[in-house]
Image (spheres, rainbow, N blue to C red):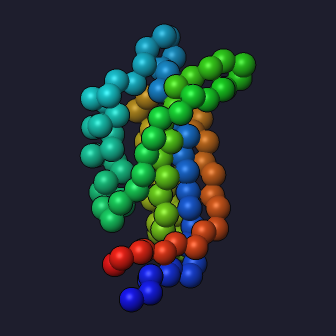
């Protein structure tokens, strides 16, 4: 059986710094709670996350990258923005970088 292809998909990445102003860091427990409380309810079908090392305004910072692929849909795009806004609020971030790219998604073996 050929793979199922989603013809119009948006790949969105959020780059979320793990340093908190004042010298603190977002703990793994805090990050896990954020994923369960904020991300999973909006995208229960799935997403991917990984850690990276980033640079922000001359400094190095550990970063969590969250990637979500979804059909072109205003409601889903708005949900990604809500995730970024809540991350900024919850962890006192100046900004969360959001990157949006058109994608072609295949589900192989489904």
| Identity of the residue drawn at 39% across and 89% down | 1
Is the residue 56 above or below the residue 7 in the image? above
Viewport quadrant of the C terminus: bottom left
Is the residue 70 above or below the residue 16 in the image? below
| Identity of the residue drawn at 57% across and 23% down | 61
The percent coordinates of residue 12 (x first, y second) are 56, 57
Note whether residue 72 is visible.
yes
Is the residue 13 above or below the residue 23 in the image? below
The single residue placed furthest to the top in the displayed view is: 23
Residue 61 or residue 85, whichever sits in front: 61
Say whether residue 7 is left or right of residue 91: right
The single residue placed furthest to the bottom in the displayed view is: 1
Is the residue 44 above or below the residue 2 in the image? above
| Identity of the residue drawn at 60% across and 69% down | 103
Residue 34, by quadrant, is top left
The percent coordinates of residue 29 (x first, y second) are 27, 29
Count of labels in the image? 0
Residue 2 or residue 48, whichever sits in front: 2
Residue 4 or residue 76, whichever sits in front: 4
Say whether residue 104 is left or right of residue 50: right
The percent coordinates of residue 6 (x first, y second) are 50, 80
Note whether residue 17 is visible.
no
The single residue placed furthest to the right in the displayed view is: 58
The percent coordinates of residue 38 (x first, y second) are 34, 48
């Amino acid at each position: 059986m050929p793979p199922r292809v989603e013809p119009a998909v948006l790949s969105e990445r959020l780059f979320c710094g793990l340093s908190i102003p004042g010298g603190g860091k977002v703990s793994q427990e805090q990050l896990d709670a954020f994923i369960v409380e904020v991300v999973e309810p909006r995208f229960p079908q799935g997403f991917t996350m990984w850690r990276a090392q980033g640079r922000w305004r001359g400094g190095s910072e550990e970063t969590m990258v969250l990637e979500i692929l979804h059909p072109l849909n205003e409601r889903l795009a708005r949900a990604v923005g809500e995730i970024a806004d809540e991350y900024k609020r919850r962890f006192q971030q100046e900004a969360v970088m959001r990157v949006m790219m058109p994608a072609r998604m295949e589900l192989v073996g489904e």
